[in-house]
Image (cartoon, helix red, strand yellow):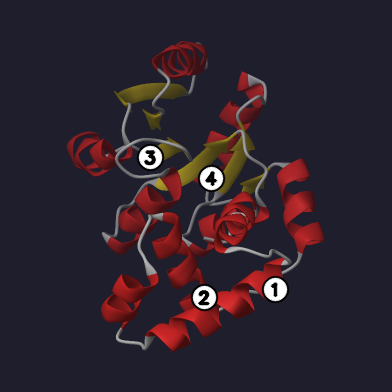
Amino acid sequence: MITVLLADDERLIRGAVAALLGLEDDLTVVAEVGRGDEVAAAVAAHDPDVAVLDIDMPGADGLTVAERLRDAGARCAVCMLTSLARPGYLRRAMAAGVRGFVAKDAPTEELAAAIRKVHAGGRYLDAELAASAMAAGDNPLTEREREILRLIGAGTDTARIATLLHLSEGTVRNYLSTAMAKLGESNRVAAVRAAREMGWV
């Protein structure tokens, strides 16, 4: 029997997926949580074989949770559910050791097949998501540019960013200008939005 943890903030979807997976002879849902910051404790308590994580959750997004599970040495395989075909998400998920990537509107049989495959040590990638990631190419932003865009997206002003990163304000503005040019945007708000839409920050 393959034991599964489900993490999704939409209770109705989480309940429906749990019920449908429960109909599979070889799968059993041992825990359900609605927040990303509840996953680690649930994994520790229930030791599931596979953790199925929604990308967008309060507390911590699914990608951050996957990175934390990897860093903590959790033995469960991770399968990501998403309704967003952002190529950067797929790349970041794979870097975090995520073995499965399934679209949220996929049939339950597809999710069940993905769970079985990742539990067996394989990978399961939704074909459309994989195609989008390949078509988008590599993330053009440097780690420093991504860091600055994330801080701007969180509402941090240039002076505070300079202090936090031990840079001059002029250097922060230069990084920001370069990032905006790479993204083809004329202002910082649009640059943050574009980078988020691609899953690059």
Kindly identify the amino acid type of the residue bearing the numbered disc 3: Asp
Q: How far apart are marks 2 and 1 (CA)?
A: 10 Å
Q: How far apart are marks 2 and 4 (CA)?
A: 33 Å
Give whichever of discs 1 and 3 has the lower sequence position.
Answer: 3
Q: Vertical placement of 135 versus 13: above or below?
A: below
Residue 71, by quadrant, is bottom left
- On the image, the x and y values in percent for residue 18 come to 44, 17
- Asked whether disc 3 touches disc 4, contact meaning CB atoms under 8 Å apart, the reply is no
In the rendered structure, the answer to whether residue 130 lies left or right of residue 103 reads right
Q: How far apart are marks 1 and 3 (CA)?
A: 41 Å
Q: Give whichever of 31, 154 is nearer the camera.
A: 154
- Asked whether disc 2 touches disc 1, contact meaning CB atoms under 8 Å apart, the reply is yes
Q: Residues within 10 Å of mark 2 (few under 14, many from 20)?
A: many
Q: What element carries label 3?
A: loop
Give whichever of discs 3 and 2 has the lower sequence position.
Answer: 3
Label 4, on which residue?
A: 118
